[in-house]
Each structure stands twice: as C-alpha cells, then as structure tokens.
Amino acid sequence: MTTAELQTTATVARPSRFDDEVGGPRTHGMTRAGWLFLAPFAVFYILFLIWPVIYMLITSFFNTSMVRSGLGSFAGLANYHEMLTKPDFWGALWHTIQFTIYTTPPLVILSFVFALLANRVQHAQWFFRLAFFVPFILPSAAIALIWTFIFTPSTGLWNEFQSLLGDPAPLPVLGTPNLAMIGIAITTVWWTIGFNFVLYLAGLQDIPRELYEAAAVDGATPWQQIRSITIPLLSRTTTLVLLLQIVASMKIFDQVYLMTSGGPGVSTQVLLGLVTNTAFTDNRIGAASAASVLLFIVILIITLARQIVESIQNRREA
Amino acid sequence: MAFRDRDSGSYAAGARLSRRGLIRGGLGVAAGAGLAGGLSACGSALSAGIAGTQLAPGTVMYWNLFGGGDGVRMVAMQDAYTRSPGASPLQAATFAWGNPYYTKLTLATVGGAPPDVAISHLTRMQNLATANLLTEFTDDMLSMVGLSPSDFNQTPWEAQKLNGKSYAIPLDTHPFVLYYNVDVCQKAGLLDGDGNLKPIEGKAGWEAALKAAKDVTKAYGASVSTVGDTATSWRWFTTLYSQRNGNTPFLGDGGRKLTYNRELTLDTLAYIQQLTKSGLMPANTDYAGAQTLMFTGKAGFYLEGEWEITTAQAVKGLKFGMAPVPTIFDKPAAQADSHTFVLPRMDRTEDQLKRAMGFIKFLLTQSMTWAMGGHIPAYLPIKNSEAYQKLLPQANYAKAAEFAVYDPPAWYSGSGSNFENITGAQIGLVQQGLATPQAALDSIRSQLEIYARTESPL
C-alpha cells in the first residue's frame, strides 16, 4: 500500500508532460529523488503507524503479555470470543456510541451556526475567529482541569449556579451515573468546536458574493439564502466535518480518563479506556489488541455506511 | 481515605488530574517558549534517557500511593529520613492508589526506568513478583542494614514469599476490625470496668451484643457498608468465611480454579443476609453512611479496616474504641492486606542497593509514626515496644495481625482488583436482600470462571 502511494506521489511530482515525452532516464532519476525525499517520513510512518497496526492484528490472536517477551501462546479466536461475550465490552462500546451521539450533532450544527454568525460580523471578525478557536489549542489535560473545576460537587461553578436558581441539592455532574457522560460531552463540544468552525468559515468564504446579491435582487430573505445557497454549497464541507467528527468521537479517551476515569462505577467507561486497562493494568496485550481490532471494525462500518448514504444522495441529485 | 477507591473515584480523578495537568501544561508551555528553551529544560533527562543512565545519581527514588492521613504521616517519615545523618537525597513521588499506581509501576519497570524503592500492597506484589518485575531480598541484603526475617511479624512475612523467596519487606498489616461507640456500648452494658469491650464469642454472643446495642440506638446494632463499595462487602464476607472450620481458599492453583467450600460459602452469605433482614445491621448504607451511623450513635458497632481511625478521631465529641472482629464462628480470622516495600527489578550497583536498603530500614524504624494511622507495624522492635503497647486504641486490636487472612493469589486478585469487584458486588446484593446466596454465588462463579479460564498474563 505504501509503495503504491509513494509512486503516485512521485508521478504527480513530474513537472510537465514534456519530461514524460523526453523519456526514461530523467524520470527514473526523479523517481529516485522522490523516494529519497519521502524516506525520512516513510520510515517513521512504517515504523510507528503501519507496523503497530500489523502487530496489533497479529497479537490479537495470541496470549501476548505486557511483562513477558515474545508473542506468548497461540490463542486463536479466544480473545475475540472473550470480548464479544463480555458485558464490559458491550457496555464500553455503548458508552462510546453514546458519546458520539451526544457530541456529533452539536459539534456539526453549532459550529455551522457560529461560523455563519461570525462570517456576518463586519468589524473585528478576527476576535470571533480567535475566541472560538482558542479552546482547541489547549491540551486535553488543561480543558479537563477547567471543567472538573466547573463541575466540582456543591462548590463548583455549575452547582453554585444551580443553587442560585433554587435547587437545594444540585447533583454532582461527574459523580452521577447518567449525567457524567453529558458533562464530558459538554466539555468536548466547548473544546473542539473551533476546528469545525474554522472548516465551515473557510467554506463560507469560498461561496461567491454574487450568488447572495443575485438572490437578494430576486427578493430572497436571509433565511431563504441560507437554505438555498449556503447549505447546499457547503455540503462537501459538511460531509468532511461529519466524517472527521464521528471518527474523532469514537476515539474518545483523554477526557474520560482525566475527568472520571470511567466512573462512577463503569458508567463512562469507553472502549479505548477498556483497551488501556486490559493492556496496561491487566497486562493482557493480546486481549486488548482484539478489542482494538473490534473498535477498528466498528469505525470502518460507520464510515462505509456514511459513504453508501452519500453515494445514494449523489445519485439522486444527478 | 486512601483505601476508598470505589466511592471516591470521581473526586480522586481531580487530584490525579492536577498533577498530570501540570506536567502536560508544563510541556505545552515549554513547546510554546521555543524548542531551545524546552530542550535545555529537559536536557539532562533526555540524555539520561538516551544513555540509559540514572536520572539523578546518588538519589533514592521512592514511589508510594498514600493519600489522606497516611500521606501526611509518610511525608513526616520521609522528612525524618532526609534530616537524619548520612541520608541520601530523596525524590519521593505519590500517585493515586489502586490500578493506576500498579500500572505506572509495571510500565516503569518494563520500560527500564523504575524507582529505587516502591510501596506495594502485599496482595499486589505477589503478581509483580510473578511477572519478574521485582528483585529478591536475600538474607545478605537484609543483614546489610542489620535486618533479619525474625524482625518481622511472621504472618505478613510468610505471606509475601513466592516460591520460598522474599520479594517484599512488610511495613504493616491493615486488618478489618470492629469499631464501637463507647457511649452506646456503655448504656448497653457491653463494656467492662476499664471501659473496654467485653469479649464477644460466637453467633449467640454477637447477636446478643447487637440486640443490646440496638435497644440503645433504636436503629441498628452494627453497621457495615453494603452499597457502592465492593471491597468492604468482600472484606466482611471473607472475614466470617475464614473464621469457619473447613474453609478452603476462594481461589486455588494461582487463580486457575475456584476452590471455595460451597456449603460454607452459602451458609456464610445466608448469615450475612440474616443480619440485615432481622434489622440488626442496615441493608442499605454506603461507605460514608455506615461510618456516620456509628459516629452519630445510630449503631453501636462499625466494621471496616483500621485506617478509618483518622476519620473517627476527627469527629468532635465521639468516644470510640476498637477491637479485633469477634470470633463469630469457629476460630479468629480477619481479612487484611499489608503495605510492603519492594525493589523494582533493575541492575543495581552496590551503592544503589545500600542506599535503597538504608532508606527502607530507616522508614521501618519510623513505624511508630505510621502506627498513628491505625496500621499495625510489621517491624517487631516497634510493635513490641512499650510505646506501641501504650498507643490506644491501636494496641487493642494489634493481635488481629496474627490471624490476618490475605486475598487468594491470582493475576486478577488483590486489593482493589477485578476479583474483589466481582465478588464484592454480589455480596453487596446479598446484604441488601436483592439476591439470594445461591443466585449471588452462581453469578460470582460464572464471572470468575472467565478469568480462571483465561491464561495468566504474568
């Protein structure tokens, strides 16, 4: 796969058709140079991305241990069987999907709305762009710290606000099983909305002004303009944002680990949390690899499903 | 406090967070300040990492997991070490207890950068030793600092051995004990002339004492957590189960077999349920709630590990005493664990080893400070000292260390482990009256069998 990629890149790198016609030796030299330039990256890519994925696939069939060298004894499908019959696994998978359901719609819709509003601002637009994007550059540990403070039971900002509104005993957000995941979702929306926001803003600025002017001349209201011009012309951006968002949400780990460590009980334990616990606490690399492969398959299915939906939509449009 | 894994989990996350947050935040700032600044800041760490040399030569690196009152006392002991003549510079780090701690210790050792000395629970160091992550303590090493196996309480000393070899030096024993409210027990006529608890013997004696206390409190005789803290439910059950003649370890063959005595297990579970059903003990109370019942005089007795002594002492106006869990069945027994010192596996020079052993020896001599927190010293020169004999109520339950029962060894067992969580959750349901002993044991069996069948990763 990597080889194919590299050659494609090399082909693209050819400066003109003229070189092509002139022929062999020169092109050959170019290809070699291309390889050379790519080598540093390719080595790291293979060593730290491709190989670990292959290694994960291999170890998922073995009783590989953290504290013993080598692969360990062959387990066949035992690791997969264990995960698929374990309530913990299905619980963690559900919590992961739950998080995706909580975060994806607001992160797509709100970022679109905010981008739309920021794009209409005439003066000091830079401030709004900055304001929405700044949380995104913070590390996950920093945002977890900020929101753990806000959600501190009784004395935190949120609970105090509830007390002000007259709630005598507000529930601790991160300490209540069915609220904890919502708390983490709110944190994540606040943290990552800037990324989608920037993508939408870029998309908005690509739409030619004339379209709106023409629509305005024809008497379209602002709402009609958004519905008939902005949303259709941003559909490519939306597709991208949606896909990136679903994949990012399925990979949830940092916030959960830092804010609740999967608790209370196991009510916010997500799949990557289960994987790290199995691999690094139980020392069972093999079983953890099997769980990782299963998560990979779930993400693959979601991505394929989305692809199919999109192609059906395209066909209808055509 | 350090033991309340379950119910303080979400708040403990906050404490863990701040440290990690600081480190990450620090890295972020370093990156922001420019590569040059960042590199110079961690230059020595980087070069030590690449060359595989020691980070701070001549220093004792010490990891522990003590929070709350234990944390304060451990820092006092460390300070005493630093002030002592001939002490090496000390770098101590405290991490959140439970799985995260053992994960860090394992990864650091596998990664070749472990601390010189670390604290481990006895039930957890067995797994570390099986995984070949610990250095053996030979008699030569002990005598290097004037220690010998006979200096230690033999119960934890024998329990820490793996295949006849020593991998840990026990610091203490922390058994499950009985707390009593002096005012309640006084009125119930359960105290002797000196104000100590009269001996309670057998099922009849125990139930009579609870009834007498209940008549005074008008609520409960004794309290033990039933909700939200799986470890306590397990401790209560295994304490009673181990008191019975003919009991067998819950797990056998290193966790590959379930070897509990079925009849005795069911009968013990039924007894636990009977105590809550009859109203002598509360059916629904969590860790903090069970304490409060005794502290506020709504229960005469309270069962938990001795570490809650600090909490009880902080309650204004509370007069309380402590005793070993009474022998309700055939013989004395109490669930327990020990804090131990371990040497994570690495190549040590003679000097390094001497420093590490010197540090351990010094902390052992500070066991009196440690005993304030309720833990029974394993180091006999302190345990047998006059000062400790006079330390009350600690000395009153010190003999519980002799009949301490440790959790059965298995890769999924130990304090705060999957084993305690699985068994404790079901025992909690029995206490609450939500599951029959039979249903609970069936559920325990089916869950544990998965682990028993799984090949040990150690």
Image: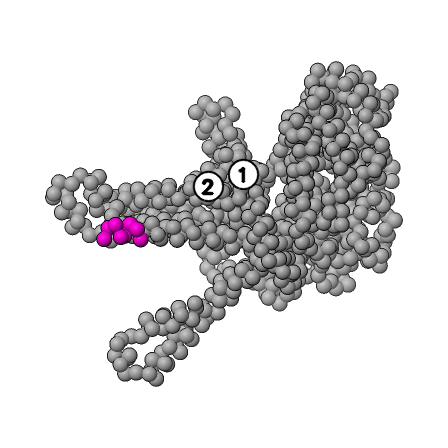
Magenta range: A311-318
The one nearer the camera, B323 or A318, is A318
Q: Is residue A25 left or right of residue B32?
A: left
Relative image position of residue A291 (x, y in whole percent) = 54, 52
Chain of the residue displaying label 1: A
Q: Is residue A120 above or below residue B455?
A: above
Q: Nearest the camera: B47 or A29?
A: A29
Badge 1 and badge 2 in a common chain: yes
Q: Residues within 10 Å of mark 1 (few under 14, many from 20)?
A: many
Q: How is the image coloured?
A: one colour
Residue toward you, A129 or B205: B205
| x and y, in percent, of residue B63 in the image | 68, 50
Q: Quadrant location of the C terminus of chain B?
A: bottom right
What type is the residue that disc 1 sits on? Ser
Task: Identify residue for label 1.
Answer: A267
Residue in the image at 81% along x and 32% along y: B324
> Looking at the image, which is closer to me, B60 or B162?
B162
Q: Is residue B133 visible?
A: yes
Q: Position of residue B217 (x, y in %)?
A: 72, 17
Is residue B445 placed above or below A160 in the rendered structure? below
Residue at point 48% right, 30% down? A159
The part of the image, by quadrant, that contains residue A267 is top right
Q: Is residue A315 magenta?
A: yes
Q: Is residue B95 visible?
A: no
What residue is rendered at 36% in x and 70% in y? A9
Q: Which mark is residue B350?
A: none
The disc placed on residue A98 is 2
Q: Amino acid at mark 2?
A: Gln
